[in-house]
Amino acid sequence: MSKVEDFLSKEDEQEIVEAIRMAEKNTSGEIRVHIEKTTSKVPFDRALEVFHELKMDETHLQNGVLFYFAVKDKSFAICGDKGINDVVAADFWDCTKDKMVEQFKAGNFKQGIVDGILNAGEQLKKNFPWSEEDTNELSNEISKG
């Protein structure tokens, strides 16, 4: 499964977008998913680059979260913006990663991503609850590189 186009079906992608929408109903946090074939960089470093390319660092509360995947490399990273990192423990994303890896090992890539997104929404609502003034600042669509 080295091609980005073959990683998820259109139906899988729609379920992931729906998971983002559901997670964002509970939090003012902004969640994005980016998938690309490969990277020559450390996955987290590449995720930070994509984070900036997608302008995720421009959210009002600095509470964007990116789920980054390099399909051919079988690697992924989760990175959060300054607003999140300033208020959470250093191992904040570990439980989310663990849930995802469990599904990935079983070959359930879509479910792993969905579980990660929903878990992130639950985690984020503790520090960034949804409020009436919230607007969806970033697209929920999956970006691809």
Image (spheres, grey):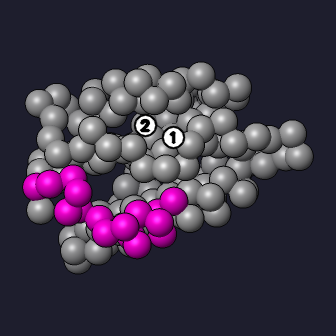
Q: Is residue 48 visible?
A: no
Q: CA distance from mark 1 to mark 2?
A: 6 Å
Q: Which residues are magenta?
A: 2-17
Q: Position of residue 85 (x, y in %)?
A: 54, 31
What residue do we see at 40% from left, 72% from top?
A: 11
Q: What residue lies at 69% left-to-right and 42% top-to-bottom?
A: 136
Tell me the kind of residue under disc 1.
Answer: Val
Q: Position of residue 5 (x, y in %)?
A: 23, 57
**Are dots 1 and 2 in contact, CB under 8 Å?**
yes
Q: Is residue 19 visible?
A: yes
Q: For the N terminus, give its image quadrant.
A: bottom left
Foreground residue among 13 and 92: 13
Q: Is residue 40 left or right of residue 84?
A: left
Q: Quadrant of residue 57?
A: top right
**Disc 2 marks which amino acid?**
Cys
SS state under label 1: strand
The x, y position of residue 58, in whole percent, is 59, 22
Residue bearing mark 2: 79
- Of 10 and 57, nearer the camera is 10
Residue beneath label 1, please?
Answer: 65
Q: Quadrant of residue 88?
A: top right
Q: Which mark is residue 119?
A: none
Residue extending farthest right = 132
Q: Is residue 71 above or below residue 63?
A: below
Horizontal and vertical percent position of residue 66? 45, 41
Vertical position of residue 115 compared to residue 65: above or below: below
The answer to whether residue 41 is left or right of residue 59 is left
Q: Is residue 19 above or below residue 67?
A: below
Magenta stretch holds residue 6: yes
